[in-house]
Amino acid sequence: MSPANRNPEIRKDAVNNRTVILSPARSRRPSDFKSKSQAKPDSNPSSDGQPQCPFCAGNEHQCAPEIFRSPEDSTSDWKVRVIENLYPALSRDLKVKSDDDEYRHADVTSGDVSLGGFGFHDVIIESPVHSVHLPDLSASRIAGVLLAYKKRVEQLCAVDSISYVQVFKNHGASAGASMSHSHSQIIALPVIPSTASTRLNSMKEYHNQTGKCVLCNIHTNKLLIDESTHFISISPFASAFPFETWIIPRYHSSHYHELDEDKAIDLGGLLKLTLQKLSVQLNDPPYNYMIHTSPLQITSSQLPYTHWYIQIVPQLSTIGGFEMGTGCYINPVFPEDAAKILREVEMP
Amino acid sequence: MSPANRNPEIRKDAVNNRTVILSPARSRRPSDFKSKSQAKPDSNPSSDGQPQCPFCAGNEHQCAPEIFRSPEDSTSDWKVRVIENLYPALSRDLKVKSDDDEYRHADVTSGDVSLGGFGFHDVIIESPVHSVHLPDLSASRIAGVLLAYKKRVEQLCAVDSISYVQVFKNHGASAGASMSHSHSQIIALPVIPSTASTRLNSMKEYHNQTGKCVLCNIHTNKLLIDESTHFISISPFASAFPFETWIIPRYHSSHYHELDEDKAIDLGGLLKLTLQKLSVQLNDPPYNYMIHTSPLQITSSQLPYTHWYIQIVPQLSTIGGFEMGTGCYINPVFPEDAAKILREVEMP
Ligand SMILES: Nc1ncnc2c1ncn2[C@@H]1O[C@H](COP(=O)(O)OP(=O)(O)O[C@H]2O[C@H](CO)[C@@H](O)[C@H](O)[C@H]2O)[C@@H](O)[C@H]1O
Ligand SMILES: Nc1ncnc2c1ncn2[C@@H]1O[C@H](COP(=O)(O)OP(=O)(O)O[C@H]2O[C@H](CO)[C@@H](O)[C@H](O)[C@H]2O)[C@@H](O)[C@H]1O
């Protein structure tokens, strides 16, 4: 049976407890809107020959303050810079609340709760050169970016009132990016976001039932794309998006920032390969990736069942009211088919 | 203090237990991508003078089978048609599973679960004329669309294995629409989606604490936009999107399909006004609306705390990896400010 004639299926995984509808027939529907033009970054953002991008080498003074750079002692020859976001979503200057007045305002009659927007919002500039994108870098240069995430996460862990750290990357305008120069972001939150607590509960339930960690035990049969010494890349069983890909450590680890240098180089290689494959197969799509780690203050009893991973999502279509309303995504591509295609994609 | 200088705030409501970051500073960030062109529908989709849109009057034969039309006995002078979706996400032909083999496949070792994709996916054509959009219709014509939703939801309720019905509308390509002719959709699911069960739990918790229904009791102080005999429109306390608007019945009601004809006309008027205000203020933005009703088989003990409402979301920006990763949205517009603007918008 050709994939497009396959019956639809509703799937749920044990990692996120996420429901998706796999529906190949959907891919055939027509559209009378003109097709979305692939939003390409301005490769040369200058109008007068001088690069105007604040993330480019030479324009460091146009940026918000630097937190650190790598190599540490580099000057104009830096490879990675971690800087404050000039337009932060949260403010590092708001007074840290003590536990009991944490909620500035909790209205008992309405049930509404509000909290001062304390937190950190940083930008990681992945290369000094405007036209170089993350997968263009060598595995060890990508490892440098991954280790910059690690170092910054470790610094943020040291702040008492921070509960969760989200590392993420937006590439391309339809993936939300406002800047085309290769970068990622880190937001440190004083609360545990809903996806992280849902995942924690879901992983706990699996552990209660089986005595095992769900990601150590994940089925790769038909869903495996590639593997390296310490990591695998797979199409997840309940993929919410066409060609969604996860990179999972083969060793058990609750927190991303446990990554060491050796493993970072190995991960750099697999991340590079995965992004290159998606780029070749899907014609340089906009994409996001998110590092799903565990809340910072988990207890030792939670360590056996929490396991970090990276979720990579190429942005190929716009979601609609059904997804917004239900939280359930309609995906026209079965992950078995996506995995097979990505396993076999020929690299130029 | 001007709104853009206000400190960020983290908010959570008691309706959805949804966390949002309100961060006015974010609205000032620059972009080096060319601005997204407002995706306008083809106002005349024909190339040869004959309309080619299957939703237009005269092209009924190009559509999937009709379920009903309104008025019932109309011929070419129909006002609303409810039809099957030609590219359905779920299949009405899959055998309905009995309770115990409901899950076609539940893999104990991986925790993965899959279920045959049984369900219904319909389209509501809101007008026979291509260029007429929902808010262009009179309040009583909009009531006709709302009552068509009601009638179809009632039919779907009669199917044993259906647990939840999502009514939604996509307007404009960046809101996900593939068809520009004014329409909405209904998907009936054999499972309760995560947003609906989270909402149920959240409303229950509020009821346990206060003995009241959270939406009957909602604070409108500063957040009220408009009111009609039976409905109010508000900017929700924890708005996830700029100018997100809810229309809430002032009477207690768990299910959308309890709407009667009188109330439908009243709701038609307020929905028209709301969509017109958003269109004037935000320059005809793409938007989605979702009717958030309760699971069909709730018990009588759940009736006192469940209350349906409509969520309207203008699509003004693209979300990024932070929202995908955490489920927490960053909204640069405080709902108090949005409500004030929408209260005062001058209608032409
Ligand atoms: N001179 C400078 N110095 C320091 N920082 C600078 C700077 N100039 C710009 N910046 C910051 O650089 C960041 C670039 O980030 P991205 O391009 O990944 O997307 P952005 O955060 O704008 O929004 C996307 O991601 C967020 C989070 O997911 C979504 O809320 C949003 O809708 C989506 O468009 C911006 O956050 C901006 O504030
Ligand atoms: N001749 C015909 N007869 C009957 N039906 C016909 C038809 N021709 C087309 N259709 C159907 O009409 C519908 C039009 O729907 P919309 O424009 O609201 O968005 P669509 O469902 O395509 O996708 C958006 O909404 C869904 C659900 O939110 C998201 O999954 C998706 O990503 C987003 O683009 C389509 O579902 C299509 O299958």
Image (cartoon, coloured by chain):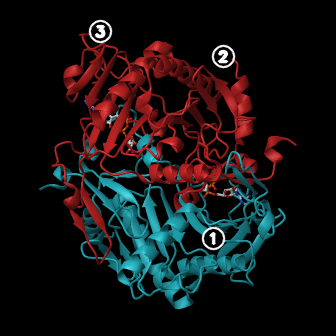
Chain colours: A red, B cyan
The residue under the point 50% across, 37% down is: A308
Residue B165 is tagged as 1
Chain under callout 2: A
Residue A77 is tagged as 3
Secondary element at tag 1: strand
- Which of disc 2 and disc 3 is earlier in sequence? 3
Does the Cβ of the disc 1 residue fall within 8 Å of ligand 2?
no
Dot 2 amino acid type: Met
Expressed as whole percent of the image width and height from the top left, the position of residue B50 reads 71, 56
Distance between the Cα atoms at labels 3 and 2?
A: 31 Å
Does the Cβ of the disc 2 residue fall within 8 Å of ligand 1?
no
Secondary element at tag 2: loop
Expressed as whole percent of the image width and height from the top left, the position of residue B129 reads 62, 67
Q: Is residue B293 above or below residue A30?
A: below
Distance between the Cα atoms at labels 1 and 3?
A: 58 Å
Q: Nearer the viewer, residue B148 or B306?
A: B306
Expressed as whole percent of the image width and height from the top left, the position of residue B171 reads 53, 58
Task: Work out which residue is located at the far right of the displayed protein and give it.
Answer: A1
Q: Which residue is mark 2?
A: A347
The residue under the point 70% across, 40% down is: A335
Q: Nearer the viewer, residue B89 or B185?
A: B89
Dot 3 amino acid type: Asp
Residue A255 is tagged as none
Residue A296, image quadrant:
top left
Q: Is residue A142 above or below residue B24?
A: above
Q: Dividing the image into four quarters, tell me where ligand 1 lies.
A: top left
